[in-house]
Image (tube, rainbow, N blue to C red):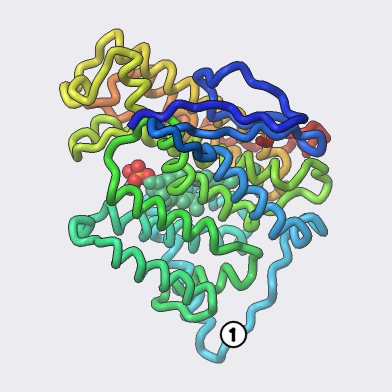
Amino acid sequence: MSAAMIWVVSPNSEVCNGLGFLDGRLKNVGRNRRVVRRVVANPSGNLAISSEQLVYDVVLKQAALVKEQMRSREDVEVKPDVVLPGTLGLLNEAYDRCGEVCAEYAKTFYLGTLLMTPERRKAIWAIYVWCRRTDELVDGPNASHITPKALDRWESRLEDLFNGRPFDMLDGALSDTVSKFPVDIQPFKDMIDGMRMDLKKSRYENFDELYLYCYYVAGTVGLMSVPIMGIAPESNVPTESVYNAALALGIANQLTNILRDVGEDARRGRVYLPQDELAQAGLSDEDIFAMKVTDKWRFFMKKQIKRARTFFDQAEEGVTQLSSASRWPVWASLLLYRQILDEIEANDYNNFTKRAYVSKQKKIVALPIAYAKSLVPPSSRKLASN
Ligand SMILES: CC(C)=CCC/C(C)=C/CC/C(C)=C/CC/C(C)=C/[C@@H]1[C@@H](COP(=O)(O)OP(=O)(O)O)[C@]1(C)CC/C=C(\C)CC/C=C(\C)CCC=C(C)C
Ligand SMILES: [Mn+2]
C-alpha cells in the first residue's frame, strides 16, 4: 500500500512546499508556532494524521506532564529513599547489575553514563536495561517463541513496576527510578508497541511508516531520558521543544542503526528502508539481498545519511538546554553515534558486509570536544518544534 502525503493547513499556518526529502524535520517555533497538521491519504481515500503529527502529540503531553517539576530548579527533584530494612543492599546490587549490563552491551552509552551524576547514572542504567530486555524479546535468542501475548505480559509487568510491584531485581531498579524521577509510563508502553510492530512487519512502505517505528523503538528513549537529565533552570525555550530535540536524537540514532545494519538485517529477511524511496532510486529488495555496492546504492545511501544528519542537527539545538551536568554525556553520545554515518561513507557505502564502527581513538578525541560543547549555556534562541 503506497501512501501519498498531503498537507492540511490550519487557517494561521504556513504552507510548506510539498513533502521534499526532509519531510521528517519538525518545523517552526515556540509561542508563535503555526500549526501544520500533516495527513496521510491511503489509496482507498481515507485520511489519517501523519506519524510525525501523532508523535508530536505525545511530545506535547510528556512536556506538559513534567513542566512544573523540571522548571523549578536545575537538579530534578530526587525523592529521598524510602527503604525497608535489608532492601537497600539489594537495590544497590540491582543498580550495579544494570550498570554491568549497560557496559557489556553498549560501550558508547556506558561511557556517556560515566560522565553523569551518580543518581542520574543509576537511573539511566535502569532504563537502559529495561529497553534492552524489551528489545531482546523480539531480537534475542528466544525471539522465535515470542508471541503478542508475551508482549502483553511484559506490559503488565511494566504497569506493576510503575505501581511499586517489581517482578524481579532489574525491574526493582527501574521501579525505584520511576519513584524518584518524574518519568511517565507512556514512552515505555510505546516501545512495547514498537516491538509488536517488529513482530508483524518486515517492510516499511514509506518514511512515514518508518518514522513511527523509529519513534516507538528509539524516540521513546529520548522522552524517557529528559526527566532524568533535567532541563537547565536558565533555559527559557518551551519544554516541548526540548522533548522534541530528545525525540530527534532517538530518531537519528535509530536511522543510523538501520543504515549501519542493512546487511545484517537483510540476512534476517528484514529491510528497514522506505520501499518507495528504494523504488525511486531504481532499487528493490533483490538489490539489497544481492549485497552489491553500486552507484545507485551510493546515491540512495547519500540521501538516507543526509536525512539522519538532519535529525542529529535538530537534536543538537536541544542538548544545550539540558541541565549543565547532563550536557557532556549527551553531547558525547550524539557525537559518537553521528560518527557512524561518517564511517559508512568511509567504507564507500558498503554497509552490506562491512560494519561501520568508531575506533577507540576517535571516541577518545570526541570526549573533550563534547566537554567543550557542554560548557555552552542555554541561549534564548527558540528551538524547532512541530
Ligand atoms: C534534549 C536532548 C537531545 C536530550 C537527550 C535525550 C537522550 C538521552 C536521548 C537518547 C536517545 C537514544 C540513546 C536512543 C537509543 C536508540 C537505539 C539505539 C534504539 C535501539 C533499538 C532497536 O534497534 P535494533 O534492534 O535495530 O538495534 P540492535 O541491533 O538491537 O542494537 C534499541 C535497541 C531499543 C532499545 C534502546 C536501548 C537499549 C538504548 C537505551 C539507551 C539509554 C537509556 C541510554 C541513553 C543515555 C545516553 C547517555 C545517551
Ligand atoms: Mn535489537
Above or below residue 379? Residue 188 is: below
Tally the marks: 1
Above or below residue 30? Residue 189 is: below
- Confirm if mark 1 falls within 8 A of ligand 1: no
Above or below residue 232? Residue 346 is: above
Is 146 situated left or right of 305 in this image? left
Which residue shows up at 41% across the image and 37% down it? Answer: 209
Which residue shows up at 36% across the image and 60% down it? Answer: 133
Q: Position of residue 5 (x, y in %)?
A: 49, 27
Q: Is residue 71 visible?
A: yes
Q: Position of residue 161 (x, y in %)?
A: 49, 74
Secondary structure beneath label 1: loop
Above or below residue 48? Residue 118 is: below
CA neighbours of label 1 inside 10 A, class few (<14), some (14 to 19), many (20+): few
Task: Tell me the quarter of the image containing the C terminus.
Answer: top right
Q: Position of residue 26 (x, y in %)?
A: 62, 32
Q: Nearer the viewer, residue 146 or 318?
A: 146
Q: Position of residue 139 (x, y in %)?
A: 27, 51
Which residue shows up at 54% across the image and 34% down it? Answer: 39
Q: Which residue is mark 1?
A: 83
The residue lying furthest to the top in this view is: 295
Q: Nearer the viewer, residue 318 or 360?
A: 318
Is 25 situated left or right of 357 in this image? right
Q: Amino acid at mark 1?
A: Val
Q: Nearer the viewer, residue 287 or 344?
A: 287
The residue lying furthest to the bottom in this view is: 85
Task: Tell me the quarter of the image containing the N terminus.
Answer: top left
Q: Nearer the viewer, residue 17 or 331?
A: 17
Q: Is residue 329 visible?
A: no
